[in-house]
């Protein structure tokens, strides 16, 4: 039976028995928090069983504090006691004991219990000395503790061979050298004078800057606050990264590579061959045309790429697309929701004939949808740029499309649609030189024509799904609260934007007030948006007479896809701003026009800079009026924080 003030090992730490309880239990006192420069040590107590402790000394000890202080002062916890200083008296005694035992052939390989071994080099061990003696043996290169025996409640040590000692000494020396090199690195880091080879120490900083961890030992040791922005700044300041490194896709947990699993070839199935030519109208640099339009004299046709013919719900490809949510478009390129080679089989107009899921719309003279049929088709598609379509808008093939688009705009406006036009730009990054270009997005009426035809397809698809009781992802938006007076020009567009409510997606149709549509669904980009892909899967299942996804499953998958799509959108915004700031850093003499879009008493005026598609707040000497244009230049850029400040150019 153990006694009060006996010294024991409890959970690999020293403890002192403070009370003997009934049922073979004891109260032990242990140090729960070590002392610091400003606070004393904190001690705790716990009731434990005898089998959960190992006796070091029967005692009595004077106090747990004295047990700990002897170990700290006389028996420092060092990893290499091979080359001892004369002042380390206990360590020298341990070394002398080993040399004596190692020289005796009879003791080689012999095991010694703790108290027996200590008695060979220390006359009489007191309770206060017991933990220090244990540490002196445990942390030496000469003796090895038998941990298996410790599990049985015994403290047993054996002599190490010279080969083992040499190996431990070598490791300890290497660790000591590594510590010296790291200390020197930290000094260079604090002085902001890193060497090229110092990048090997910055891996944890990169991991933090990329959002892969929230800790950095290097930054902690250097006294730098551990945030992603500070890590980014540190990597820039030390030259490990240059300004062209874009961390945002990885920081948002996104892959910068397209999906890898290939889609099967389109299945052989019955398809209606649409007569005539349909037109895929897109930007000149578009690589993934996924829609085409036509008018046959009676029906308006909107043809959409048909990857749902192959992507089976809940298949591995479907799950991967759901996780991404959408194709990621950043200035460096696109990371596609579906694999790159899917474009050859499923994009429209890349082959002589294209498979499509088509929406055949019968419209009245006011562009109201009287009838919508959803059909599996084969289409002859001709590709046009927006600019070329603009030149051909009076042609017999395209004129009816422009006319119905104008009527649809009128119809939606009468229903309360809110038309907002904001400046847009395209950002290009040269892959070799990393030089950035920012180009204003030229808008044509052909852009609007395609947009209106896509809205008609979304309206028709929603009505088709509702009429046929198909569980479907409907998009709605609450009515905005628009004040009676809206400013003219760009200031008015910004004011309208602030009035808009967030859209929502659900399985019950509702008014999309922003678009002026009584019901609406997005169905025109299944190569690029998971929500559109799942809509196509439902429509195809209905056409084929197969089982539909139920509403609960639809909601769950829509929610999962939206989470990925939201991360992609945020990454795209961050990436675009990052590259805009890089453009300004590469062009320090840049100046441009800024339009005042808002000002309120007591606040800085808000400006829009159209050629950068950026907003800014800054003061203008003498004041400024709404929609007034001023010439500005950059006053400060903080790339890691994605901040830029502008000022009036003199």
Image (tube, rainbow, N blue to C red):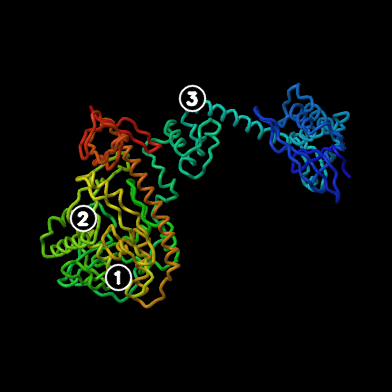
- Which quadrant: the N terminus? top right
Percent coordinates x, y for residue 279 in the rendering: 20, 63
Left or right, 27 with respect to 573, comes to right
Q: Nearer the viewer, mark 2 or mark 1?
A: 1
Mark 3 lies on a secondary structure that is loop
Which residue bears the numbered disc 2?
Answer: 447
> Could you say whether the residue bearing mark 1 is in a helix, strand or loop?
helix
Q: Is residue 179 left or right of residue 431?
A: right
Quarter of the view holding residue 477: bottom left
Disc 2 to disc 3: CB gap under 8 Å: no
Task: Measure the alpha-carbon separation of dots 3 and 1.
Answer: 67 Å
Compared with residue 449, is residue 271 higher up or lower down, i.e. above or below?
Answer: below
Vertical relation: 18 (above or below) 356: above
Could you tell me which residue is drawn at 87 percent across and 35 percent down?
59
Relative to 222, 605 lies left or right: left
Question: Residue shown at 78%/46% (left/top)?
Answer: 47
| Closer to the eye: label 3 or 1 | 1
Label 2 and label 1: CA atoms lie apart by 25 Å
Seen from the viewer's position, the closer of residues 267 and 115 is 115
The dot on residue 463 is: 1
Tell me which label, 2 or 3, sits earlier in the chain: 3
Q: Earlier in the sequence, mark 2 or mark 1?
A: 2
- Could one spot residue 103 in this view of the protein? no
Residue at (27, 38) in percent of width and height: 599
Q: Which mark is residue 191?
A: 3
Indicate left or right for 380 with 139 as reference.
left
Residue 455: quarter of image: bottom left
């Amino acid at each position: 039976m153990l006694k009060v003030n006996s010294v024991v090992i409890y959970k690999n730490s020293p403890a002192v028995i403070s009370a003997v309880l009934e049922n073979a239990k004891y109260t032990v006192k242990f140090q729960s928090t070590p002392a610091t420069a400003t606070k004393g040590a904190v001690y705790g107590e716990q009731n434990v069983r005898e089998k959960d402790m190992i006796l070091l000394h029967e005692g009595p000890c004077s106090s747990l504090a004295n047990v700990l202080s002897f170990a700290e002062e006389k028996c420092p916890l060092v990893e290499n006691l091979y080359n001892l200083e004369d002042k380390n008296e206990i360590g020298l005694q341990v070394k002398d004991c080993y040399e004596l035992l190692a020289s005796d052939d009879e003791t080689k390989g012999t095991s010694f219990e703790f108290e027996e071994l200590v008695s060979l080099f220390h006359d009489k061990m007191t309770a206060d000395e017991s933990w220090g003696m244990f540490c002196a043996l445990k942390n030496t290169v000469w003796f090895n503790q038998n941990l298996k025996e410790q599990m049985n409640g015994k403290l047993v040590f054996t002599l190490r061979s010279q080969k083992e000692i040499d190996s431990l000494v070598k490791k300890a020396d290497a660790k000591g050298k590594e510590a010296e090199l790291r200390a020197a690195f930290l000094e260079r880091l604090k002085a902001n004078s890193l060497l090229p080879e110092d990048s090997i120490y910055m891996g944890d900083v990169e991991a933090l800057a990329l959002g892969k961890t929230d800790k950095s030992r290097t930054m902690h040791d250097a006294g730098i606050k551990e945030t992603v922005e500070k890590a980014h700044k540190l990597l820039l300041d030390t030259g490990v990264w240059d300004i062209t490194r874009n961390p945002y896709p990885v920081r948002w947990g996104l892959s910068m590579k397209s999906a890898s699993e290939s889609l099967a070839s389109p299945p052989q199935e019955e398809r209606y061959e649409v007569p005539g030519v349909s037109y895929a109208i897109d930007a000149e640099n578009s690589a993934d045309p996924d829609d085409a339009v036509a008018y046959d004299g009676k029906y308006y046709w909107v043809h959409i790429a048909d990857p749902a013919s192959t992507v089976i719900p809940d298949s591995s490809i479907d799950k991967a697309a759901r996780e991404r949510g959408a194709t990621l478009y950043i200035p460096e390129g696109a990371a596609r929701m579906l694999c790159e080679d899917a474009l050859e089989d499923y994009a429209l107009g890349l082959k002589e004939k294209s498979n499509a899921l088509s929406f055949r719309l019968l419209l009245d003279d006011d562009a109201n949808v009287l009838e919508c049929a959803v059909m599996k088709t084969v289409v002859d598609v001709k590709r046009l740029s927006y600019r070329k379509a603009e030149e051909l808008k009076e042609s017999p093939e395209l004129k009816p499309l422009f006319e119905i688009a104008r009527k649809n705009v009128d119809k939606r406006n009468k229903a309360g649609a809110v038309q907002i036009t904001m400046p847009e730009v395209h950002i290009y990054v040269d892959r070799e030189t990393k030089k950035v270009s920012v180009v204003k997005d030229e808008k044509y009426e052909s852009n609007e024509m395609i947009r209106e035809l896509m809205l008609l397809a979304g309206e028709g698809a929603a009505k088709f799904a509702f009429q046929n009781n198909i569980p479907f992802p409907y998009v709605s938006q609450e009515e905005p609260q628009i004040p009676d007076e809206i400013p003219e020009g760009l200031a008015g567009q910004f004011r309208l934007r602030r009035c808009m409510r967030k859209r929502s997606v659900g399985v019950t149709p509702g008014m999309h007030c922003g678009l002026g549509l009584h019901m609406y669904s997005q169905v025109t980009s299944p190569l690029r948006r998971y929500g559109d892909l799942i809509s196509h899967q439902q429509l195809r299942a209905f056409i084929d007479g197969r089982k539909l996804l139920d509403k609960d499953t639809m909601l769950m998958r829509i929610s999962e896809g939206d989470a990925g799509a939201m991360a992609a959108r945020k990454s795209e915004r961050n990436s675009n701003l990052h590259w805009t700031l890089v453009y300004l850093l590469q062009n320090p003499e840049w100046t441009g026009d800024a339009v005042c879009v808002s000002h309120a008493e007591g606040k800085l005026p808000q400006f829009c800079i159209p050629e950068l598609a950026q907003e800014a707040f800054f003061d203008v000497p003498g004041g400024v009026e709404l929609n007034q244009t001023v010439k500005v230049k950059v006053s400060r850029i903080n790339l890691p924080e994605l901040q830029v400040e502008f000022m009036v150019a003199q």
